[in-house]
Amino acid sequence: MKKILITGGAGFIGSHVMRLFVNKYPDYMVVNLDKLTYAGNLANLSDIEDKPNYEFIKGDIVDAPFIDQLFAEHKFDGVIHLAAESHVDRSISNPLEFVMTNVIGTVNLLNAARNEWKDNFSGHRFYHVSTDEVYGSLGETGMFTETTAYDPHSPYSASKASSDHFVRAYHDTYGLNTVISNCSNNYGSFHFPEKLIPLSINNIKNNKPIPIYGKGENIRDWLWVEDHARAIDLIYHKAKPGSTYNIGGHNEWKNIDLIQLLCKIMDKKLNRAEGESARLITFVKDRAGHDLRYAIDSSKLQRELGWLPSLQFEEGLEKTVDWYLANEEWLKNVTSGDYMNYYEEQYVKR
Ligand code: NAD
Ligand code: DAU
């Protein structure tokens, strides 16, 4: 039986990757290593927690002796590394936390993998899940390709860029069998409500202002999270050692247009008069260093591995709204306690 370590499996994307692997590969033992920060939630995995090929381990990737011990004990065949601090606004208020988890944590995993796998690098894969934000910001035209130069602007993207460089360095220097993917903005179920789409759904539902940074003209390229998980599955199994793939849905939306569409869907779902939810739109102070536009060219992934996004955005957004409205308890649990303090600091006191 193959044993795969997935880090950050209790987070948004990690939980979808975990679910896909546990269900699709009953002959793999899938181990979920997660610190359970504010963003990690075992309730995201309640449908697979009793499966015989799933194991959860609580732990911190910043703790090097613990990581070394874990690799020595478990003899993993491969790693899919998603654990990270992932929210740009939090990186602006606390950059060091991002350096610790995203850079030091990644290097700890690379060191443990290098040490454990040194006699057979080619038989063990280290897959690092990264972001399109490492490429910086686009003007009105063009797209990020796998050869676009790195140009990160936020502490979050700088920490992810740094971790990508370390992963490539371990391939080039030591011969570790690494792959990296850089994906655009994901959306779907289990998305923590600090991010634009779930935050707006939650606020619309509660008749609270929808905070739009600046003029709402920034553009993001949105991808259904399950399509990202499918891409990760393909890349983990099929990509050449040392390769990189961009993942994205060719689905660019100006923030304000996206929120207008969301308001329309919410009006319908909540039986509100047309235009009622849109009245909650409130323009607030812009994010510092706010990247204008992201757009991903995923043609390499489509051409080489046959991946295609499966859902139209309008359909995916409606499914997402349905999920949040049907999972009030989940939303209530993750927005109690610490979330209230975060919200106060980020939106009320500013
Ligand atoms: P998330 O914040 O929802 O989840 C992160 C998970 O990592 C949580 O379960 C958390 O508990 C865990 N974690 C954090 N610090 C840890 C530590 N020190 N040790 C162990 N576990 C720790 O993040 P996400 O949105 O699911 O993103 C997952 C990965 O995908 C990240 O690497 C992110 O950079 C990347 N990514 C995200 C997006 C997106 O749109 N969300 C797009 C492209 C790439
Ligand atoms: O591009 C991939 C990245 O997408 C991932 O690497 C990150 O982990 C993920 O958080 C996401 O980053 P963004 O900064 O693009 O996502 P966020 O949801 O925070 O913001 C999306 C856009 O909406 C961005 O232009 C900022 C804006 N925004 C965001 C929030 C939270 C608002 O206008 N108001 C808000 O309250």
Image (tube, rainbow, N blue to C red):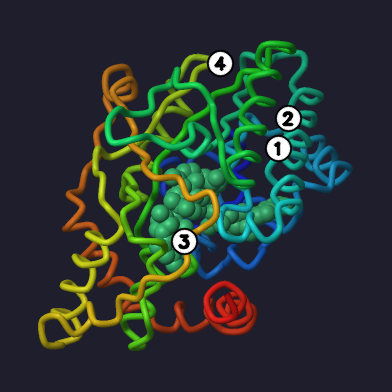
Q: Residue 77 in the image: x percent, y percent?
A: 63, 29
Cα distance between the residues tagged 4 and 3: 38 Å
Is 100 rendered above or below residue 270?
Answer: above
Q: Earlier in the sequence, mark 3 or mark 1?
A: 1
Q: Is residue 326 left or right of residue 242?
A: left
Q: Which residue is mark 2?
A: 110
Q: Which residue is mark 4?
A: 242
Q: Residues within 10 Å of mark 4 (few under 14, many from 20)?
A: some
Q: Residue sitting at 57 percent across and 67 percent down?
A: 41
Cα distance between the residues tagged 2 and 1: 6 Å
**Image-quadrant location for residue 337:** bottom right
Q: Residue sitting at 60 percent across and 22 percent down?
A: 178
Quadrant containing the C terminus in the rendered view: bottom right
Q: Residue 83 in the image: x percent, y percent?
A: 62, 48
Tag 3–tag 1 contact (CB < 8 Å): no
Quarter of image, ligand 2 = bottom left
Q: Residues within 10 Å of mark 2 (few under 14, many from 20)?
A: many
Q: Identify the disc placed on residue 106.
A: 1
**Image-quadrant location for residue 251:** top left
Residue found at the very far left of the displayed protein: 274
